[in-house]
Image (cartoon, grey):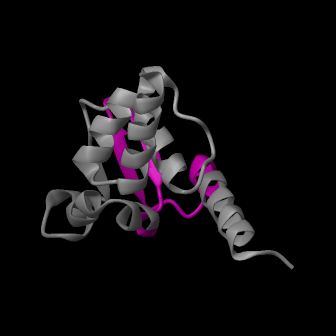
Amino acid sequence: CCSMSEALQQLGASLRRDRRCGIGCDVVLRCGDTDIPAQLSVVCALSPVLSKALTGAFKETAARAIELPDVDPAHVAFALDHCCGAVEDIDPQMALPLLSLADRWQMKPLQSSCESALRAML
């Protein structure tokens, strides 16, 4: 049928599509006035920091929402998509803010991609 790599790409594409359509989304990442719906299981798998916030003894756990007033919603959406296997190249303009976000949320795959994009600019 298909290789493991192809199956993972299909899974990532399905998760991205579902998140963008709000399917299976049970948490919200609130960036100012913009709500970004997401799947708790995916967010927890991608970021140990967000996992703690959404599953620990914090107000975010009960609210099923994380307030991110200082984060650009486009960066959050890109980070979620990228870590679910999106093959998009990282725009050099976004690389530094995304690297900061990846470091803050301990998203190793995104951090590595941002570092590569920044090195390519040198």
Q: In which quarter of the image is residue 107?
A: bottom left
Check residue 15 for magenta coloring.
no
In the depicted structure, whether residue 4 falls above or below residue 15: below
- Quadrant assignment for the C terminus: top left
In the depicted structure, whether residue 67 falls above or below residue 121: below
Q: Nearer the viewer, residue 78 or 26?
A: 78
Give the residue displayed 17% in from the left and 70% down from the top. Answer: 56
Residue 33 visible in the snapshot: no
Give the residue displayed 60% in from the left and 60% down from the top. Answer: 15
Check residue 28 for magenta coloring.
yes
Q: Which residue lies furthest to the right in this view?
A: 1
Give the residue displayed 44% in from the left and 39% down from the top. Answer: 116
Q: In which quarter of the image is residue 32?
A: top left
Q: Position of residue 9 (x, y in %)?
A: 68, 62
- Number of disc labels: 0
Q: Position of residue 100 (x, y in %)?
A: 27, 36
Residue 121 visible in the snapshot: yes
Q: Is residue 75 left or right of residue 16?
A: left
Q: Nearer the viewer, residue 89 or 34?
A: 89
Q: Residue furthest left?
A: 57
Q: Is residue 17 left or right of residue 69?
A: right
Give the residue displayed 27% in from the left and 58% down from the top. Answer: 50
Q: Which residue lies furthest to the front in this view?
A: 122
Q: Which of 19 and 7 is in front in this view?
A: 7
Q: In which quarter of the image is residue 104?
A: top left
Q: Where is residue 111 in the image (x, y as percent from the top left)?
A: 36, 46
- Quadrant assignment for the N terminus: bottom right
Q: Position of residue 34 (x, y in %)?
A: 41, 33
In the depicted structure, whether residue 7 falls above or below residue 111: below
Range of residues picked out in magenta: 18-41
